[in-house]
C-alpha cells in the first residue's frame, strides 16, 4: 500500500512516518495523530445504542448491586428481565425476543452481554466473590455531565480492548482491528457521500489486510459483509455511520447496502496529520 503512494507536494516516503505514528497512536492522548473528543453532550452521545445500553446496565448494577452471578458467571434471569424491561426497543422486536426465548438469559440479550463485557473491560464494573460491583469510575459515568467521557471510554474499549472477532465470529481477520486507525482515516474520506459497502472494503482496507480477508473468505461471502461486521455495524452502533438500502443488484436481485458518515463523526473523530496524507492515501487506491 505505502509503496503505491505517488510523489507530489508530500512525497510517499514522507507519508510513511505519519502512517506509522497513526498506527501506534495512543487513543487516550489529546495530542496524538488520532484525537477523540470528550465534550459530547448527553444528547449527542445518546445517538449510540451502546452508550444507552451501557448506561442502563451501570444504573441497574448500582441500584441492584452487588449483583449476584450464576454458577457459570452469567447475570441472573432477574437482572436480565430488569434490563430487558427498560431496554430501548420497538414492540415488534420485543415480541420476537419472547417468541424465540421461553426465558431470557444473558446470552439471549446480545446488547446486554456486549454492554457487560465492554463495561468490565473499561473498569466500570468489577467482579468480586461472584458478584458484580459498580466501581467509582462506573458511578462517575452515570453523571450526565460525563456523557462525553463515557462515550469516549466505551469507544476506545470496544475497538481497542475487545476482540472484534468475538462480536463478529463469522470470519477471523485480525488485521482489520490492528489497522483500525488507517481504516478510520480512509472511511472519513470515502464515506462522506453514500458508499456501497461491497466497494468500500477495496477502498478503506490496507492492501495486506484486504489480501488476507480475501484469502479467508468463503465462496459465497462478500468483502463488504466482513467489513460491516467488524467495523461498519459497530460504528453505526456508536451513531457515527448510517446505513440505507441502495440499488437492486442486477441478476440476483439483492438490495445493495450503502453507508455514509453522520454529523457526529466530525464532532468526535479528528486526525492531526499533514493535509497531503489523506489525499495521497486516496490517490494510492488502497
Image (cartoon, grey):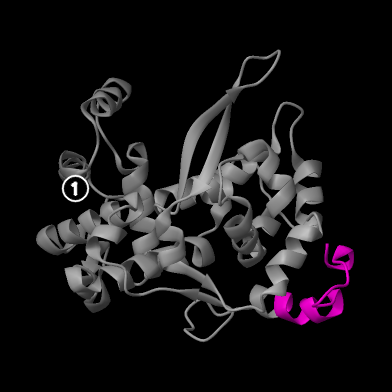
Looking at this view, name the residue that lies furthest to the bottom. 31
Q: Position of residue 234 (x, y in %)?
A: 47, 50
Residue at 66%, 65% in the rendered image: 182
Residue in the foreground of this view, choosing between 105 and 200:
200
Q: Is residue 172 visible?
A: yes
Q: Is 276 situated above or below 162? A: below
Q: Is residue 124 visible?
A: no
Residue lying at the far left in this picture: please name it.
Answer: 63
In the rendered view, does 112 fall on the left or right side of 165?
A: left
Q: Is residue 104 above or below residue 126?
A: above
Q: Which residue is mark 1?
A: 79
Query: For the stretch drawn in magenta, what is the main secondary structure?
Result: helix
Task: Give the x, y percent position of residue 49.
Answer: 33, 49
Residue at image location 60% in from the left, 55% down from the top: 187
**4 magenta-colored:** yes
Taking depth in this image into account, of 228 and 40 the one nearest to the observer is: 40
Residue 108 in the image: x percent, y percent?
34, 36
Residue at the image position 41 percent from the left and 66 percent from the top: 267
- In what quadrant of the picture does the N terminus appear? bottom right
**Callout 1 secondary element:** helix
- Quarter of the image for the C terminus: give it: bottom right
Splitting the image into 4 quarters, where does residue 57 fall? Answer: bottom left
Residue 218 horizontal side relative to residue 151, left or right: right
Q: Nearer the viewer, residue 245 or 228?
A: 245
Using the image, determine if residue 95 lies above or below residue 29: above
Q: Residue at x 35, y 75 (%)?
A: 38
Counting from the top left corner in percent of width and height, residue 26 is at 55, 80
Foreground of the two, 142 or 121: 142
Task: Write the start and end of the magenta stretch as one range.
Answer: 1-20
Amino acid at each position: 500500500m505505502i509503496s503505491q503512494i505517488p510523489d507530489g507536494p508530500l512525497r510517499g516516503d514522507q507519508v510513511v512516518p505519519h502512517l506509522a505514528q497513526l498506527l501506534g497512536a495512543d487513543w487516550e492522548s489529546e495530542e496524538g495523530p488520532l484525537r477523540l473528543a470528550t465534550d459530547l453532550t448527553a444528547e449527542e452521545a445518546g445517538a449510540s445504542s451502546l452508550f444507552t445500553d451501557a448506561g442502563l446496565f451501570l444504573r441497574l448494577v448500582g441500584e441492584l448491586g452487588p449483583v449476584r452471578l450464576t454458577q457459570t458467571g452469567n447475570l441472573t434471569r432477574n437482572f436480565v428481565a430488569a434490563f430487558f424491561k427498560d431496554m430501548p426497543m420497538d414492540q415488534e422486536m420485543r415480541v420476537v425476543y419472547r417468541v424465540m426465548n421461553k426465558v431470557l438469559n444473558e446470552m439471549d440479550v446480545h446488547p446486554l452481554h456486549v454492554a457487560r463485557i465492554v463495561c468490565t473491560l473499561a473498569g466500570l464494573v468489577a467482579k468480586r466473590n461472584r458478584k458484580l460491583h459498580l466501581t467509582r469510575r462506573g458511578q462517575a459515568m452515570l453523571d450526565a455531565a460525563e456523557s462525553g467521557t463515557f462515550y469516549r471510554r466505551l469507544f476506545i474499549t470496544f475497538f481497542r480492548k475487545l476482540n472484534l472477532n468475538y462480536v463478529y465470529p463469522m470470519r477471523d481477520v485480525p488485521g482489520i482491528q490492528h489497522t483500525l486507525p488507517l481504516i478510520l482515516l480512509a472511511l472519513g474520506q470515502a464515506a462522506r457521500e453514500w458508499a456501497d459497502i461491497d466497494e468500500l472494503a477495496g477502498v478503506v482496507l490496507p492492501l495486506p489486510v484486504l489480501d488476507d480477508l480475501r484469502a479467508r473468505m468463503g465462496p459465497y461471502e462478500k468483502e463488504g459483509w466482513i467489513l460491516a461486521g467488524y467495523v461498519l455495524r459497530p460504528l453505526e452502533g456508536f451513531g457515527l455511520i448510517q446505513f440505507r438500502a441502495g440499488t437492486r443488484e442486477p441478476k440476483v436481485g439483492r438490495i445493495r447496502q450503502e453507508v455514509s458518515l453522520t454529523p457526529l463523526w466530525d464532532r468526535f473523530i479528528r486526525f492531526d496529520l499533514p493535509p497531503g496524507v489523506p489525499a495521497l492515501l486516496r490517490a494510492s487506491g488502497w
